[in-house]
Amino acid sequence: MTDTASALARLTDRLGPAAVLTGAEAMAPYAFDWRGIEESHPLAVLRPAATEQVADCVALCAQAGLALIPQGGNTGLVGGTVARRGQPAVLLNLGRMDRIRDVDALDFTLVAEAGCTLAAVQAAAEAVDRLFPLSLGSEGTCTLGGVLSTNAGGILTIRYGNARDLVLGLEVVLADGRVWNGLRRLRKDNTGYDLKHLFLGAEGTLGVVTAASVKLFPRPRQVETAFAAVPDPDAAIDLLARLRAAAGEAVTAFELLPRFAIDGAAAFLDRRFDPLAAPAPWYVLLELGGGMPGSALREAAEEALAEAAAAGTVLDATFAETGERRRQLWAIREGLPEIGRTLGGVVHHDVSVPVSRIPALIARGTAALEALIPGVRPYPFGHAGDGNIHFNVGRPETMPGKDFLARAGEVTALVHGIVRELGGSFSAEHGIGGRKAAELAAHKDPVELDLMRRIKRTLDPDGLMNPGKVLPP
Amino acid sequence: MTDTASALARLTDRLGPAAVLTGAEAMAPYAFDWRGIEESHPLAVLRPAATEQVADCVALCAQAGLALIPQGGNTGLVGGTVARRGQPAVLLNLGRMDRIRDVDALDFTLVAEAGCTLAAVQAAAEAVDRLFPLSLGSEGTCTLGGVLSTNAGGILTIRYGNARDLVLGLEVVLADGRVWNGLRRLRKDNTGYDLKHLFLGAEGTLGVVTAASVKLFPRPRQVETAFAAVPDPDAAIDLLARLRAAAGEAVTAFELLPRFAIDGAAAFLDRRFDPLAAPAPWYVLLELGGGMPGSALREAAEEALAEAAAAGTVLDATFAETGERRRQLWAIREGLPEIGRTLGGVVHHDVSVPVSRIPALIARGTAALEALIPGVRPYPFGHAGDGNIHFNVGRPETMPGKDFLARAGEVTALVHGIVRELGGSFSAEHGIGGRKAAELAAHKDPVELDLMRRIKRTLDPDGLMNPGKVLPP
């Protein structure tokens, strides 16, 4: 019996047959790439149900020289859980580790296992009148372990930070099979190096996150949602500063949208909805949330919008007076990925720059793309309050999708080059996975890259933890 | 000429004579232990004025086998910048690196060098109508590099987090003399491992922080300060939950104070001030801050206090109606360290537990101390909103200070033992330094301790970066 076969046999003994899946059909629900760019070919899919079982998986696979690819909801967009053909690797799917271990309303803390969906964590917090403020499109499917291992962002980052900022402690199975129990629930603890931040955002390349203790927050008692038309991205950034001056940290979302969000919904999704009377080139979908009931939020937002209108940086604006209207306004934002799927050829970019440089990014990127491929349809949008723009680029109407996608490399090199010149990041919230590892190695500061490689060698000397992801082989 | 002498000679050439201090008199302003517990005996004090000079110091000292002890304002309380007698070590004082490199009001970011005082950073933010929300007693003297290297906490942590939570990027001189320029100003960047959190809170044992880019916040437009009498610590935690339910994240400070804060000020500082009519065993000094003007904060606080009064968890309360009154209320809190200095013998503890366990910590700790040393005077107080209690213990009136301090080890072992049983930390915000390194090694989870040692060996293979601090020799 080969090492692999005997390792899987021993794991079947330990975990039970239902936890060790082999064969294309059984593995199909796990062994695919969300964006369909690569095929995934694991030797097996392991589905442990407890931390000790994860430790068994890591230890036995290490003995057999098998690479481990940890997997949450598999909703990542950078091929972070893809097993390359010929790679001696198994998927470690944590979906069965889905217990909420503890919720403490007085401490404002929650302890949950890696396989809990983000929605389940949100619900457990809400059940004790608390908020877990991480929110993204895939929250019904993505898992706590996944969003922490990729340091996910989302729509509330401007107010609550990224996933890593919400973590108090971690439980991690290390590459040698030992369990680090760092599940603290402390707001202040200065006893030694902060190890949790090494594993947060490491995409499973340094160890397997099996559980986390996270911060909860008071639930906002009032939410105000507004949709504002602005002449250009500069005006949007001006509006953001006015809003924060008037409403302070109550600004919980600030999304920049091009007119294409409305015209594209009409043209490609047959959704005809424009909340404002006259068309405008750009829009901001903004939301304010407050711990206290009362009208102060609305007044502050109206004051900022009025000042901006007087300064010519806001053309028109409307508030959502009902929950239904709020859903309609957010649907404009959420429609953009749907529109993208109808364009027959889109190159995606998940970039960030300092907030004040967003206008330069959009102006320079759009002009350079038009010069590179006349008729191309860029539609940059996203979390402007964090400097995070999804600079997506649709094929020219007249160019076949495959011809356009054949030039994806050129398009991305152009956009990412401008991002670098502006002091930005070519992966703001989606991470590196396997797809961006070569680019990371090519453009990272050599000192930082060397530090990363030394950390990797220190924590995973045999290189079996999700090899080839984040750092190229 | 010895290696040391030639290294110092070369450094004098590079940095200039004013930057290389030797001799007891010249070194006296730097070579002491703030708490006066240990003597400090560096071979020299280096005062570089630029990052490249810091790199020269690190490289030349490494060649000569000299240990480097980075130093900011030297206001730490755990002997973190003490050079032990006979230790071949030099102090690297960063006080001359005091430039604010950049302040950007639109980005809500600030870039400053390690030697800037915390007060200077706060002032630079305020000058553009922004808030840098780190605030502690020593802010006029402590430096940005110091508060980041020790992950300082302070009075606003409940709302804004610890020092590390305020950092976007770092510039660090590594143990091999290379400079890592990680001075990003991005809110979202998922390109690889988060290295900054390794150096934050590492107390100079992994490298020298020379500059940082930090987050700024909108300045609160309104502050409400109240002083509430409560029957016991349980009632204080109940009040905290009610306040957050009513005012959400507007709660910016929540300090628990024993009656000793008022009686002790009268007895030992000759300050007779009690803001409330009747004496109570415990008090809460609470503050709410909001981005928006208007009365919502006051109403929310009054509502929570009224509910708590009806439930019997608040006995009486008063709001500060003037800035002068606010200063008087805070003076009660700030008087406690002063009172301690008059007691002729105090054992200090900087501990944290989950917020809901503060009452158990205080009850069990007080009873056990009285059993250990009858007549002892514990006066636990501090940042209850973060679970951080300064569990300080004064000598019995009838026991000579030196006899009491001779038993400091027993007292601390008792308090820290209870803290461990409650899942807490024996160093919440002051760090480890040299003074708590042995205790860290004795009580840290062995897996975590091993990870820390491997990180140390990886980033500082020769062990010359502040050796003996955090991790014992």
Image: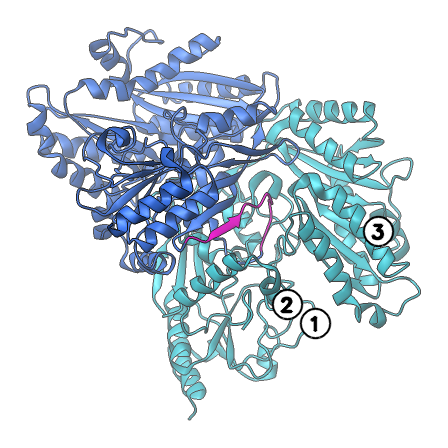
Chain colours: A blue, B cyan
Viewer-side residue, B46 vs B89: B89
Give the x, y percent position of residue B259.
85, 45
Spatial separation of the CA atoms under disc 3 and disc 1:
28 Å
Describe the element under mark 1 as helix, strand or loop.
loop
Rendered image: mark on residue B435: 2
Q: Do the residues labelled 1 and 2 touch (CB within 8 Å)?
A: yes
Point out the stretch of residues depicted in magenta: A177-190
Q: In which quarter of the image is residue A451?
A: bottom left
Instruction: Name the kind of residue labelled 3 in the image.
Output: Ala
Instruction: Name the kind of residue labelled 2 in the image.
Output: Arg
Question: Can you name the residue that lies furthest to the bottom here?
Answer: B1
Identified at 20% across, 30% down, the residue is A36
Question: Can you name the residue that lies furthest to the front here?
Answer: A1
Question: Nearer the observer, disc 3 or disc 1?
Answer: 3
Rendered image: mark on residue B133: none
Q: Does the magenta run of residues contain A179? A: yes
Q: Do the residues labelled 2 and 3 touch (CB within 8 Å)?
A: no
Report the residue marked by disc 1.
B37
Identified at 61% across, 26% down, the residue is B293
Q: How many marks?
A: 3
Give the x, y percent position of residue A303.
50, 20
Describe the element under mark 3 as helix, strand or loop.
helix
Q: Which chain carries label 1?
A: B
Spatial separation of the CA atoms under disc 1 and disc 2:
9 Å
Report the residue marked by disc 3.
B367
N-term-proximal mark, 1 vs 2: 1
Question: Mostly what secondary structure, the magenta segment?
Answer: loop
Q: Which chain carries label 2?
A: B
Q: Does the magenta run of residues contain B96? A: no
